[in-house]
Image (spheres, rainbow, N blue to C red):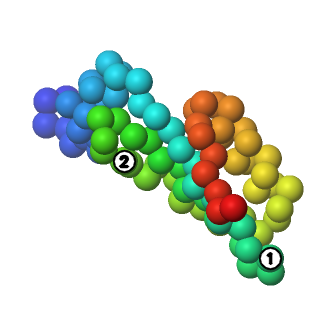
Amino acid sequence: MENSIFLFDKKLLAKARKTNPKFYIGIDTYKGSPNCYCLTREIDGVVEILIAKQIWNDEIFNTEVNNLAKYFNATIIKEK
C-alpha cells in the first residue's frame, strides 16, 4: 500500500539496523509502593523510551528486569 501510515520512521529504523544501539534499564524500588523500570535505547546520542512500567510484586519485577537485561544486553542502572 503506497498510502499507508507508518508508526515508525523508516529512516530511524534503517539507522537502528546499521548501528549498534545501547540499551539501559533504569529501576526505582521503594518499600511499600510499586517498583518501576524504564527500558531505553540510545542510538547516536538519541535516547528513546521503549517501556515504562510499574509492578507491585518484587519477584515478578526482578524476573522481568533480569530477562529484559539478558534479551537486550542492557545495562541496569539503579540508585545506590
The numbered mark at residue 45 is: none
- Outermost residue to the front: 80
In the shown orientation, is residue 41 left or right of residue 35? left
- Identify residue for label 1: 31
Report the number of discs.
Answer: 2
Is disc 2 placed on a helix, strand or loop?
strand
Q: Amino acid at mark 1?
A: Lys
Quadrant of residue 31 in the image?
A: bottom right
- Identify residue for label 2: 47
- Outermost residue to the bottom: 32
* Real-space CA distance between mark 1 and mark 2, rounded to the nearest whole angstrom: 29 Å
Q: Position of residue 56 (x, y in %)?
A: 77, 69
Q: Residue at x 79, y 47 (%)?
A: 63
Q: Residue at x 30, y 30 (%)?
A: 13
Q: Amino acid at mark 2?
A: Val
Q: Position of residue 72 (x, y in %)?
A: 58, 32
Name the quadrant of the C terminus.
bottom right
